[in-house]
Amino acid sequence: MKQKLLILAGCLALSACGGSSNNDLSSITSSNNTSSNGGTNTPQVPVNTAPTLSGIFTIDAKAKSQYDLVLNAQDKESDPLSISIENQPDWLSYTLENNQVKLSVSPDFLDIETHTYPISVSDGKASTSYELTVNVLDNPQAWAPIDISAAELTGAWEDKQQHLALAFNQQEQGILIENGELSRLEYQNDALDKLWVYEHGCISDCNLKRFTGLQLIAKTSDKLYITLTNKHNENQAYMLHKSSSVLNEKKYAHNLYPDITLYPNRTLELTSLPTDEQRLTTLHIRSHLPKRAISGHSIHKHYTLHYLKGVYDKASGEFTPSKAVIPYSFPFFSNSSEFDELHFTLSYDKIRIVGKIQNHLIIQSDYSYQLGTQSEYINFDPNKYQNLSEFLRPKSDLMAYPLIELTEVTTPLEVGKKYTGKMAPPQLNWALGEYKYIGAIEFSIIDDSTGTVLIETAGKSVKELRTFTYSQNGVELSVSFDDNSYKYAQYSMPSGETFLVAQLTDETSGKTYDNIGYQHYEVDKTITSADYLGTYRHMTNVYAGNMSISPNKATYSYQGPYEEEHGDVFKIQADGSYSFLSRSACHSIGAYDFDTCNTSLTEGNLLISAKNMKLLKRENNIYTFKYSHSFLYNEQVYVHELIYVLNKLD
């Protein structure tokens, strides 16, 4: 609402307090005016002066209280004046009488913040503008909690300062993010004045972190003013805004292992919510594990995670996975505390993106497990398994995982250089002799349209050079291996790290989606075998132990105490990298050097985890390696390549 009041101002001396003015010149022409000596007089042109306001233009006002402020209006020509306030809220009013502007403010709790409004005074020909500031302050003495149900709070909420975020569903579940710390909430009977705070990924035998209580002071459909009991048992007030389920079409990376130091991140798992009908959304969704089962995910320790592709509906926020039923197996304990491997199918009934708060994606899912066909080797009786009926009940889950916004970048490939970035996606199903090969993490650029990938076993006994053609058009990189063509994009993290991501096609729907990204940088060609010497600790694989390399002894710690004392059987390869075999395994077949042992184990189909570590990059004491692993599994030999990041200790 705007008011305009006109007054006839008396003749007052001009008193301006700053601001900007807009003057109109009014001219009055007198015809046939002559002077006493017969000459013609020059017409008089009065100049209009813009009106002014004076006084204090700042009000400090507590919520649920009324405050007044008076400004003085002045105009040299005593013209009728009017006042206008841009974006004037309902709780701000004014009157204009006897050259005085009386401002009255009566804000509520939802108005708590600093507001700035342009205020102007005009005489119809010129105007002057000023800035009116209203600081709306809290008023704890006027707090009067109002009732609210969890249904009214359903959704995701956060404050602008990123200190607090909350999410609720209608199944007595919630999420709390307080100064970056992620927790799970429980409450009972729709009452939010007592909230149980647990670890986010814990659902059984959980340690209670603390109690907290929520009180609602004021609300609209998209804004809340609440108090929450903090760790010091004090009521802290927050202004929360509702997060929309409609996210932008940017790409995000997420880290499901925040307790493991990733420097730099070895791979990039993308989350995107495209609205393009030809593209699929990729999301991680979780489901609960049987009681007494624990996963390796620190923030989802009682859950297993599924990487799903599907369609995202922007209007509703719903995600429909391409694969609706997922087969899964768990070791399930019987009443006698023994366990069998039981087979299940997992069905997601509904998945909905609730919103993004404090850089966490909030996902609501409804799902259930069904018993699958069990192995003929177990005497299956559902009554003999602990908690099986509870495990099979339909479940609802409210999940949060951290997101990092990505930027699409272009890094031209240069002839003669070697780069990292997985150039051969799994869809190629490459074979290296008898080996199934998963890797191609390194590639070389030969000329402006051709590159090569060297694939080899960890012992370097079998190798092939594969050729590809490529072209770069802006941010898009097109690559072809024989008749198989793929497109790649490059994305940058806020840290500056760049990742190469394949744009793959879903076999069922024919739509494209973003695959996992791999680090993309130029390989350091100056590295020699001497640069490997030292003791290292893994930073991206907490289970791998240490690696130690000296001129006469090298140990890669997947082995036992015998190797710790004597070292592995190793070989320095032509490219400077180190290959390792278990000393005890080699000695058990009478082989005492690497080549003899590697040949004997391979020919005897007794291959026991040959490994190779090739140094790709050094940054201070952070060393990045390509890890190759040749191994036998279910009568099939494999070669698998990964990126490992190690901290050099000496």
Image: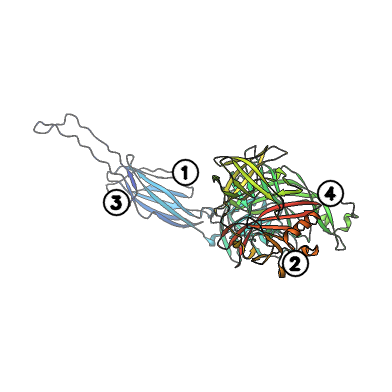
Real-space CA distance between mark 2 and mark 4, rounded to the nearest whole angstrom: 39 Å
State the separation of the CA atoms marked 2 and 3: 90 Å
Q: Which residue is mark 1?
A: 1
Q: CA distance from mark 2 to mark 1?
A: 80 Å
Q: Amino acid at mark 1?
A: Met
Q: Residue at x 44, y 51 (%)?
A: 116
Q: Can residue 269 be spotted in the picture?
A: yes
Task: Give x and y (percent) for residue 130.
Answer: 37, 49
Whether residue 243 is visible here, answered yes or no, is no
Q: Position of residue 273 (x, y in %)?
A: 63, 44
Secondary structure type for disc 4: loop
Please state the horizontal and vertical placement of residue 514, each as a whole percent of the image: 64, 44
- Three-letter residue code for mark 4: Gly
Work out which residue is located at the far left of the displayed protein and give it. Answer: 37
What is the quadrant of residue 201 in the picture?
bottom right
Q: Give the alpha-carbon distance from disc 3 to disc 1, as whole Å.
A: 29 Å
Report how far apart the C-alphas of labels 4 and 3 lie in the structure.
Answer: 87 Å
Residue situated furthest bottom in the rendering:
565
- Count how many numbered circles sit on residues in the image: 4
Which numbered disc flags the more N-terminal residue, 1 or 4? 1
Question: Which mark sits nearer the N-terminus, 2 or 4?
Answer: 4
The crowding category of the residue bearing disc 4, from other C-alpha atoms within 10 Å (few below 14, some 14 to 19, many at least 20), is some
Labels 2 and 1: the sequence-earlier one:
1
Please tell me the numbered disc located at residue 372: 4
Along the polypeptide, which appears first: circle 2 or circle 3?
A: 3
Nearer the observer: mark 4 or 3; the answer is 4
Q: Which residue is mark 3?
A: 15
Q: Is residue 485 above or below residue 417?
A: above
